[in-house]
Image (tube, helix red, strand yellow):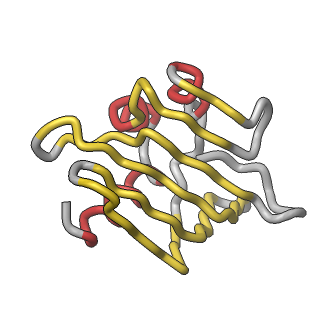
Amino acid sequence: MDDDRVWKFEERLWRASEERYHERVDPECVMALSHAPHLFAGQAAVDAVSGTPEWDEVAFDDKTMSRPEEGMIVVGYNVTASKGDTQFKAACTSVYRRRGHEDWTVVQHAQVVPSGGTNGRR
């Protein structure tokens, strides 16, 4: 997956429906999120993204990406997302693994919310 497609994939997850999350979050995923209990793994990680807003506006800055090995992509960025009057800002990382041709899933996602930040969820 080329770099542009990686960032589009990540943005689509922020704008995604619950169904899309369940398709793209790997059953082996580990997440660190801004809401209790903060650490989620496996089905709990999949469930943790249920009820997340389908953000209307999403912007990334300070983007970075690495490809430590074939079939693995790591991204890091700052995000600002909004829906109506709700705004969310965080520093994030995601790790993708390729399961098959053009079939990528999220196996790790973390969000660090600045103190005083809102508690919106991805």
| Left/right of residue 113 with respect to residue 11 in the rendered view | right
- Residue 58 location in percent, x, y? 52, 66
Q: Residue furthest left?
A: 101
> Residue visible at 27% across and 70% down?
3
Left or right, 17 with reference to 73: right
Of all residues, the one furthest to the bottom in this rendering is: 62
Residue 53 on image: x %, y %: 58, 45
Q: Residue at x 51, y 27 (%)?
A: 46
Q: Is residue 41 above or below residue 66?
A: above
- Would you say 59 lies left or right of 71 here? right
Extreme residue in the front direction? 69
Quadrant position of the N terminus in the picture: bottom left
> Is 90 placed above or below 60 here?
above
| Residue drawn at the location 40% of the way across and 42% of the way down | 106
**Location of residue 84 with respect to 44 vertically, above or below:** below
In this view, which residue lies farthest toward the top?
Answer: 43
Left or right, 46 with respect to 35, comes to left
Q: Position of residue 68 (x, y in %)?
A: 34, 59
Q: What percent of the width, then of the height, locates residue 69? A: 28, 55
Residue at 37%, 66% (x, y): give it.
66
Q: Nearer the viewer, residue 99 or 33?
A: 99
Viewer-side residue, 2 vs 71: 71
